[in-house]
Image (cartoon, rainbow, N blue to C red):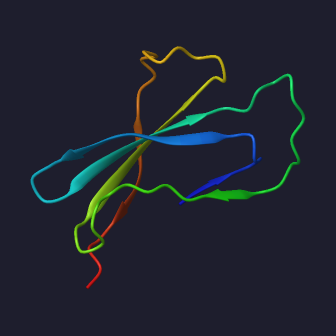
């Protein structure tokens, strides 16, 4: 789940990648369109990753401008980890 400061953010699952003891999940959050107005309120975005809950994950995120090209090379940052749930 991603909490954004406005509903204008557009999060998308970029890819998942198997690692030794977990799955790395990469998410791209496109920033709001600056020509539109958005309510200033926290908004929760749920993103389906396809990773089973009994498998640990590491989540990496990058925020790109609204008009960024699909091949944008903005780096990802580790933003969270979740252990496997029974």
- Please state if 33 lies on the left or on the right of 22 as rendered: right
Relative vertical location of residue 40 with respect to residue 10 in this rendering, above or below: below
- The quarter of the rendered structure image containing the C terminus is bottom left
Across and down, in percent, residue 43 comes to: 72, 57
Q: How many marks?
A: 0
Given the current orientation, which residue lies at the most extreme bottom position?
A: 86
Residue 58 vs residue 37, the one in the foreground: 37
Q: Quadrant of residue 34?
A: top right
Please give the name of the residue rendered at 41% of the width and 39% of the height, measured from the top-left corner.
Answer: 77
Relative vertical location of residue 67 with respect to residue 14 in this rendering, above or below: above
Across and down, in percent, residue 21 comes to: 13, 59
Across and down, in percent, residue 81 comes to: 35, 61
- Please state if 33 lies on the left or on the right of 13 as rendered: right
Relative vertical location of residue 33 with respect to residue 79 in this rendering, above or below: above
Across and down, in percent, residue 25 comes to: 33, 48
Please give the name of the residue rendered at 31% of the width and 54% of the height, measured from the top-left corner.
Answer: 58
- Please state if 19 lies on the left or on the right of 83 as rendered: left
- Please state if 44 lies on the left or on the right of 53 as rendered: right
Q: Quadrant of residue 67?
A: top right
Please give the name of the residue rendered at 53% of the width and 60% of the height, measured from the top-left corner.
Answer: 1
Relative vertical location of residue 85 with respect to residue 2 in this rendering, above or below: below
């Amino acid at each position: 789940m991603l909490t954004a400061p406005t509903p204008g953010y557009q999060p998308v699952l970029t890819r998942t990648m198997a690692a030794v003891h977990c799955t790395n999940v990469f998410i791209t959050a496109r920033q709001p369109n600056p020509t539109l107005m958005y309510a200033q309120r926290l908004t929760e975005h749920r993103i389906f990753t396809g990773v089973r809950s009994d498998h640990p994950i590491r989540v990496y995120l990058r925020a790109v401008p609204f008009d960024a090209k699909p091949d944008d090379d903005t780096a990802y940052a580790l933003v969270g980890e979740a252990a496997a749930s029974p």
